[in-house]
Amino acid sequence: MAEVANADGSSGTGSTTPTRTKKKVYTQLWFWVIVGIVSGILVGFLAPGFAKETKWLADTFVQMIKVIIGPVIFCTVVVGIASLGNLARAGGLAARALGYFLVMTVIALTMGLVAGNVFQPGAGFTGQPSASDLAKATDQAATGSQESGVIPFIQDSLLPHSFFGPFVENSVLQVLVLAILSACAISSLNPALRSRLVGGIEGIAQVIFGIIKIIMWAAPVAAFGGMAYTVGQMGGGSLVNLLKLMAVFWGTCAVFVVVVLGAVSWAAGFNVFKVIRLIKDELLIIVGTSSSESVLPRFLTKLQSAGASKQTVGMVIPTGYSFNLDGTCIYLTLGALFIIQAGGEVLPIGAQIALAVLMVLTSKGAAGVTGAGLVTLAASLQAFGGEFFTPEAIVVGLALIVGIDRMMSEGRALTNAIGNVVATLVVARWNGELDRERLAAVLDDPTLVEADMEAAHGGGAADAEIDEAADGAAKPDADESRREKVGAGS
């Protein structure tokens, strides 16, 4: 990335990057997302009947984002890996990422178990699920029963059945597999042909990001619809145990982010709170839409702009969306203990550990969209089976949770998103693919990434002209310059 211009217009590196004027707050996406969230909350309380009919606004936005998720991942991963021309280097990156994901999964599952045993949110539960909640839970349990087991996961969730099928079905993990295979094939070609193919795919990616620019204008409306529906559906209160479950879950997620991710970030040389500030726009969109997938394309651009290499971002973020779901892992073990406690039973520590080990596998491949956590919980409990989780107990237990699942889904999505951003920066640091000077500058002043974000995801004509000037002055040698800086500082 180009260095920031000094106050007098000069730059320490001789860069000609133009000085950007600070934008008015009402022209920023995050401002209008906040307006949408607050408006949705007010409408939810004042007109709950109308609010319950607004869910389609958020669902439509997420649906449109999902249309381009597959192509974005495919193009980003192929360009990131194939441009290296070094499969051994890409393999080392993947190994580090998967090792990190496994450790974070175990920690998150353990924290869910600890929180469930300490606070026991389901103890003394006397409420009964409604008929509609029972019907929803039955559907979720039926879906979960089709997704349990390691072999079905490999055959149905990991490996594609056709080349275009994963794009049609929006299967992130299968698209990632296709992208890696395609990147490996392109990497084996002669340099001239490889360069032409990578350039063509990169051009397609630019068209896709142009589509994202258009879709993102609807984010505030989606946030309004999502929050209005949530408040209208939940009302002003709920059963004490369900509120306690929500409080314990959100509290555990907060501890995970502050303590665990905070410690990992500190060890890697950056501050997790500054990272959260950097991605505040994306987190607000997640709050409104209850989906971390809605901001995946923005993460790809922002993290690369912040100093992580294209290949690291292109590999770690998409993989993390299936293998690094920290919030979902906390939800799985905590939700399982809630169901046991609400039924007046006790799950021995040995059985809890066995359940957590099983969930290390069943948690993988769960998409970061609303409701996926509930399906994964059903799949985990059915795979565990035994005297503690009979089919009837699973349906009733899920019915108890389904009413507040959207509020839980927001917590899962936020924690998953922050966890994947931290993972990308940490793995980039380990792999020598992080421009630490650039990252420090961006974390101190997040506006430094605005030019790249506007170029890829929105901005006016004036902004586009500034971005083009900046691109012409600084971007041709950006990746090579970054690698030189990283190599010198390692």
Image: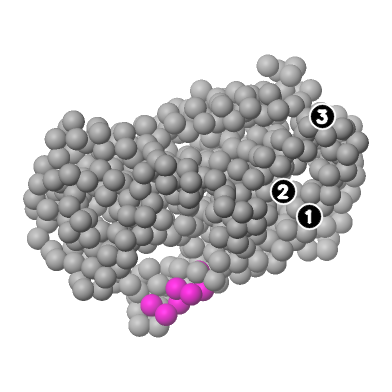
Q: In the rendering, at what x and y percent does residue 19 appear?
A: 82, 46
Figure quadrant of the C terminus: top right
Q: Which residue in the structure is indicated by mark 3?
A: 480
Q: Which mark is residue 75?
A: 2
The residue that appears at 83% across and 63% down in the rendered structure is 461
Answer yes or no: do the residues labelled 1 and 2 have beta carbons within 8 Å?
A: yes
Q: Which residue in the structure is indicated by mark 1?
A: 204
> Is residue 54 rendered magenta in the image?
yes
Work out how far the residue at label 1 is from the one at label 2, CA to CA, in angstroms: 8 Å
Q: In the rendering, at what x and y percent does residue 192 appear?
A: 91, 36
The residue that appears at 42% across and 46% down in the rendered structure is 152
Q: How many numbered circles are shown?
A: 3
Q: Nearer the viewer, residue 32 or 325?
A: 325
The residue that appears at 40% across and 40% down in the rendered structure is 150
Task: Give the amino acid at mark 1.
Answer: Ile
User: Considering the numbered disc 2 on the image, is that residue within a helix, a strand or a loop?
Assistant: helix
